[in-house]
Amino acid sequence: VIIFNTVHDPLSASIGFSILGCAITWRLVPALKDSFLKANLTGKDVNKLDKQIIPESMGVVCATVYLVCLFLFIPFPFMEWFTGKGIISRTEEFHAPTFPHHKLGEFLSAMLSLQSMTFLGFADDVFDIRWRYKLLLPTIASIPLLMVYYVNFGETHIIMPIPLRFLLGRVVDLGLLYYVYMGMVAVFCTNSINILAGINGVEVGQSLVIACSIAINDYLFLNGSSPAVEAHLFSLYFILPFIGVSLGLIMHNWYPSRVFVGDTYCYFAGMTFTVVGILAHFSKTLLLFFIPQIFNFIYSVPQLFKLIDCPRHRMPKFNPTTQKLNYSRVHIQKPLGIPAFVILKIFSSLGLVEITELENSIEVNNFTLLNLLLLKFGPMNERTLTIVVIIIQIFTSCIAFIIRYRLVHLFYEIII
Amino acid sequence: VIIFNTVHDPLSASIGFSILGCAITWRLVPALKDSFLKANLTGKDVNKLDKQIIPESMGVVCATVYLVCLFLFIPFPFMEWFTGKGIISRTEEFHAPTFPHHKLGEFLSAMLSLQSMTFLGFADDVFDIRWRYKLLLPTIASIPLLMVYYVNFGETHIIMPIPLRFLLGRVVDLGLLYYVYMGMVAVFCTNSINILAGINGVEVGQSLVIACSIAINDYLFLNGSSPAVEAHLFSLYFILPFIGVSLGLIMHNWYPSRVFVGDTYCYFAGMTFTVVGILAHFSKTLLLFFIPQIFNFIYSVPQLFKLIDCPRHRMPKFNPTTQKLNYSRVHIQKPLGIPAFVILKIFSSLGLVEITELENSIEVNNFTLLNLLLLKFGPMNERTLTIVVIIIQIFTSCIAFIIRYRLVHLFYEIII
Ligand SMILES: [Mg+2]
Ligand SMILES: [Mg+2]
């Protein structure tokens, strides 16, 4: 109800800020190149012949522009309380019952969590934070989010899918576990983009596809019932400027990159998705848009958890002669441990690995989506590989929409 | 009323977090030294014989610990709504009228503004941001703060001091100007600490004195009437952990410094003071605690605005023979411009400058409080100078308390 009345105005303001954010990012990124080079925030573009040193972690520029845009945007959804001044009642006990303080709280907590992750990402780029903190800090960063979720909604019941009801019943109250689940969504979204990375344009490319899918999904709800409209408008307010600044950034990050986006961008993007997924109540749909990331994560697990040897970098290998990328490989000493043996057995039966037997060791491709694509489709140009990833992301988003809107009746009675 | 009922619990939690914050900062700062050196965040300790390179902008560690402490603390003042679960009513329109959403909004906006400034300060340390952005960004960072001020209080009337009432009447509604004033408090607090800096321990030292003064002032209100109690408890929740982490930091930053605190700390400290001053309604009292900074700022104005030549650094000069600091000087070419001439005339009649006439130029001390102290009291050891500044800060805080609580009846009818 609350935002419904002003539906048209804040949305156009949001679109305006998104376009502005795009333009500013596009202008600011090249202007700040020298500062980044001077501050030693640089990376080597290894998949090129000349291996240039270019500015790293430009995502911080893009995130800062985004945050400034949202700071300036915050008053817009509440405009009617500002223009129709009399409506805000200020009693001595500081109560203003008509003003939607809880809505403002959602904005503020979302911004706070977002900014925390951006800050963490930037710190990671500057200092190279250790892995355990990378898992701990997103959890702390999502505290404001979860707290506002608790006081504004507090819904921890989930409706079980029909095929599972014989086990647990129709409705299950996850209670505290639901908050653990949401915290894990935050950790997953922020880190999963970060591990599907390493070639020009792929981080921003995949994030843009996910963001557009979210925006389309929000748009589909806009003519529905009022609480859902409100939630999805909220989501749009966060996603549209994100699309704007990401477009501004990808123009400089597309092959051949003139800047890298850094961990900052991956964390920033992941947290934006988490924020809208949680506060607009579509975390399950959100995860459907992460199919390639989920696949890549599960595929990577054996190496991430050191069950299979994990080299420092698992990026595809650049072949200077052909100027194409090929999959990178890792040596594993014989004899294999039991977990490694089992994993290789399973993966090879699924056609996910290529094993070469050597005398005292075996050689196997590194377990990442990028390497798998190169294994299946043969060596590719860097740009082509990015485009393939983006196409896969778009394709899985289409599948996600089909699951969400066509197959949902297999699992639930009604489309919620 | 709201927090009054739970007055004892959150306050002890806050004290607990402050002690924890102190301990963690104290441990973390030396542990992270190497990361800072590797990231090239370093400064040269120029006022020593060996001019060691030591880690710079350690304030970011202290600020991060502070923010994490506050993230974890946020739920405490609202505990009664969490334990007495039934009280939160969750209707379908997402209204929860009994929960103090506006209070939570204050916390969130305060955190958001604080974190923005910390982020900006850190960016300044890494990139050396230009002056005009330094003035623009604190303004943007305080938008969430001002917006929450608007919706929660919206009070823009000020009661004029008695001696000025013949001019403007008893009550003046500043309207929009009041928000400009609050924005300027943010810009002033963040930058004024940053310009009274440059010798070991002085940034943290002065901030600690200001913070303790605020805490004492809050404490004096705790037995008063309920709205004031609530506001000053809010202030304590922010100030106590600040005192904690600053104590943890100064142990490493005290003469001879093993780490520098960087712009990050100055911005972080300034914004903490702004946040509590604005949201707990004592911005005028707050400015009374800034007397040395206000003096230093006004004294610096001619050089900051380039009316008098301003060298890149205006820090005191280290004398390697005596190992003491002496005031630094600037050459001004003759003939002097009219503004420069007038300023020198005024300042010398106030005894604030020492002018040496040379053939084609004059030489004058740089216009900073530190140089003035060295001019008046003669060369000093670096540690002594810091102690003198801290003593002055304590002394002016005492004056501030006298003005606020003893002389206030000369300007206002009642002690508010
Ligand atoms: Mg990193
Ligand atoms: Mg600087």
Image (cartoon, coloured by chain):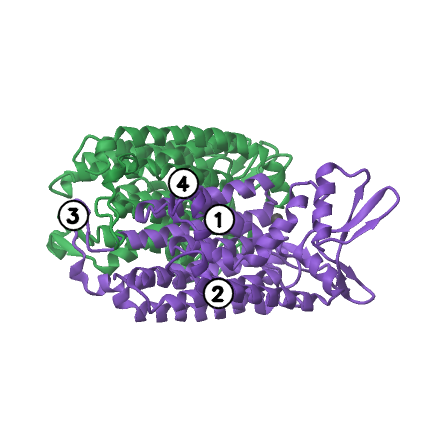
Chain colours: A purple, B green
The answer to whether mark 4 and mark 3 are in CB contact below 8 A is: no
Res. B385 visible in picture: yes
The residue labelled by disc 3 is B161
The verdict on a common chain for dots 1 and 4 is: no
Question: Are the residues under badges 1 and 3 in a single subunit?
Answer: no
Gap between marks 1 and 3, in whole Å?
Answer: 52 Å
Secondary-structure class at tag 3: loop
Label 4 chain ID: B
Q: Amino acid at mark 2?
A: Phe
Q: Between disc 4 and disc 3, whose residue precedes? A: 4
**Left or right of B93 on screen, residue A400:** right
| Residue sitting at x 51%, y 34% | B253
Residue matched to label 2: A401
Nearer the observer, B102 or B88: B88
Q: Which numbered mark, 4 or 2, is in the foreground of this view?
A: 2
Q: Nearer the viewer, mark 1 or mark 2?
A: 2
Chain containing mark 2:
A
Picture quarter with the N terminus of chain A: bottom left
**Inter-mark Cα distance, 1 to 2:** 22 Å
Q: CA distance from mark 4 to mark 3?
A: 39 Å
